[in-house]
Image (cartoon, helix red, strand yellow):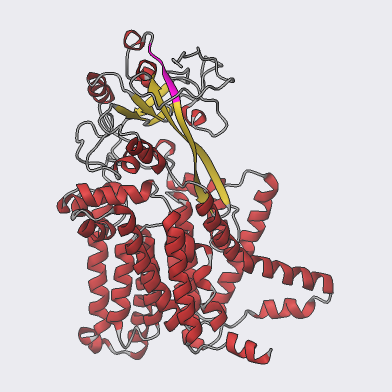
Amino acid sequence: MNKFKEAALSKKTGKAELITLIIYTVGIVIIGLFHEVWFDEAQAWQIARCASLKEMIFEIPHYEGHPPLWHLILAIFAKNGAPYKITLKVINTVFSSAAIAVLLYKSPFPKIIRCGLPFTYFLFYRYGVNTRPYCIMMLAFFLAASFYKERNEHPWKYILSLTLLCLSSAYGIIIAGGLCLVWTFEIVYEIVKKKTFKTIPTDKRVYALFFILIIAVFLIILIVPASDTFYAGIFEEKSFFGEVFSFDFWNKFLDIPLDSWSTRLIKSSAPNIHIASIILGLLSWGVLISIASSNKKLLTFLFPYVITLVFCSCKYMAPHHIGISTLFHIFFFWIILDANTNIKIPNYIHHLRNTIKSSIIKKSVATLMIVLSIMPFYYSIAASYLELKYYYGYGNLADFIKENHLEDSKIMITWHNEFEKSSENPNATALSNALDINTSFSELPFEHEKVKMHLTYICGLGPTITIAFDHNIIMNFNVECPDEMYVHYKYKEDTKAIMKKWREKGLPDFVLCPSLIDEVYTEEELNGVKYLPIYVETNVIINKDELTSAKSIVYMRDDLFDDYPQFHWIYDPKADLYEIKHDD
């Protein structure tokens, strides 16, 4: 037992680290083989394949919201005809495995932690299996942590790592900027205290900081949103103070530290969960701040972390962004251990532990800590299992088109709509409800709520489907620029003119997922025309151990059954549909 304990707490590297790296790499490769390309992954590949270098660097970042490095890396392969599935997975695996190698061989954590961290949810599933630029961010974080201790003696290693962090994501710019500002403050304090002003012109740190400042300013200029940029919260725009004083902001801000490891509290609707999330959130913040203070890293922790989480909570946060907090925590504890060889526990924690005499309370606290420690591994296993069991994303629609040779038919996909909040028709439904997994397979066109605004350019299925083909096979996807098979996040457009161009192509043969075709075509054009469901499959979005299910539905115009004898109407007794007769 003593030998095991000694080995588990050892900081020496050896066979365990190599075995861990091999298992991690093999693990993400195996799960990755079952991972279907989701919208964000397809969007990046399509940008890399279709956009020019000038567009990728100077135009698209204004709409995508992150630096162009990921697109430029993918472009090397996408523009030369590399297969998208294997290429995306190989690139992500290379960066993720390199990051884990740095963690295993350079971090000061005890062996049991070093070899356990790679299999937690964000490091394994989110950033190892999912193919996004966060694999680069993970590598940048770990390189920066490994060079942090010697940043004053060898500033360029640290600065170049932070530069890579900037290039990986907009959030990377914020965090790197925060760390550099704290470092600048430390350098200025040192110069003033020692009165070594004459050394400033020869100080390598000054030039290194000036270098990353230029890079950061350049990247910020590139990603500043254009005036017509669409993003998820554009129709619920609030002032900064309006956001900060909202419950949604505090729900995210307080819960991110714990959600980045052991819980899934954000956006929960249960009142009792709200109370628990506030309590746990305050406790987690209190512990982190007190540890930072005890280890003389309060400013290094608070400045970049708070700014990042405020931005994240105010503006835009997706489930994969929560893992940025995970990476920062690893960075934070890494630099503490590198400086002090151990983490100083705040005195109040020692005092509480000595004050509590009840064995029940002690066992409860111990049990809670064990559960919280196990949860990151449970989420990783659960997400991987769900990835193996279910179809992730809408790529099955591309498979359906290929298998049935429908590339040359007229295919229409759904687009984003903003509905009026109320409807005069009690039988009307919103498109989001029509996509719900429990909804009956209604024919098209169907009754729906009044549309407030059409966003014809937001066609999420576009990149996800066309990534499997060498040209745009969708009749209503980027009709003005069909060779650009990625979503253009521009919300100012002439909707009537766009729909007129759709209409000029005639009625679609197939409609993928419920679409508001009655908003495109006139009553006269749709008179006697019906689209009936011929294919349906469940697809999911995975977040830890949670599934969000939807339907992949293909509708065919009812006069085409003789042309496609392999298809049959999916009869749903809950739907009020007329009967289609087929010859025996």
- Asked if residue 302 shows in the view, the reply is no
Between 226 and 382, the residue placed more toward the observer is 382
Position in image of residue 107 (x %, y %): 46, 81
Magenta: main secondary structure equals strand
Residue that appears at 44% across and 41% down: 238
Please tell me in which quadrant of the rendered image residue 144 appears. bottom left
Between 460 and 417, the residue placed more toward the observer is 460
Above or below: residue 302 compared with residue 267: below
Residue 120 lies within the magenta run: no
Residue that appears at 44% across and 15% down: 583
In the rendered structure, the answer to whether residue 442 lies left or right of residue 73 reads right
- Toward the front, the furthest residue is 584
Between 355 and 86, the residue placed more toward the observer is 86
| Image label count | 0
Residue that appears at 26% across and 23% down: 502
Instruction: Give the quarter of the figure containing the N terminus.
Output: bottom right
Residue 532 lies within the magenta run: yes
- Asked if residue 275 shows in the view, the reply is yes
Position in image of residue 432 (x %, y %): 48, 31
In the rendered structure, the answer to whether residue 347 lies left or right of residue 473 reads right
In the rendered structure, the answer to whether residue 32 lies left or right of residue 163 reads right
Position in image of residue 96 (x %, y %): 39, 68
> Which segment is the magenta one?
529-533
Position in image of residue 170 (x %, y %): 34, 58
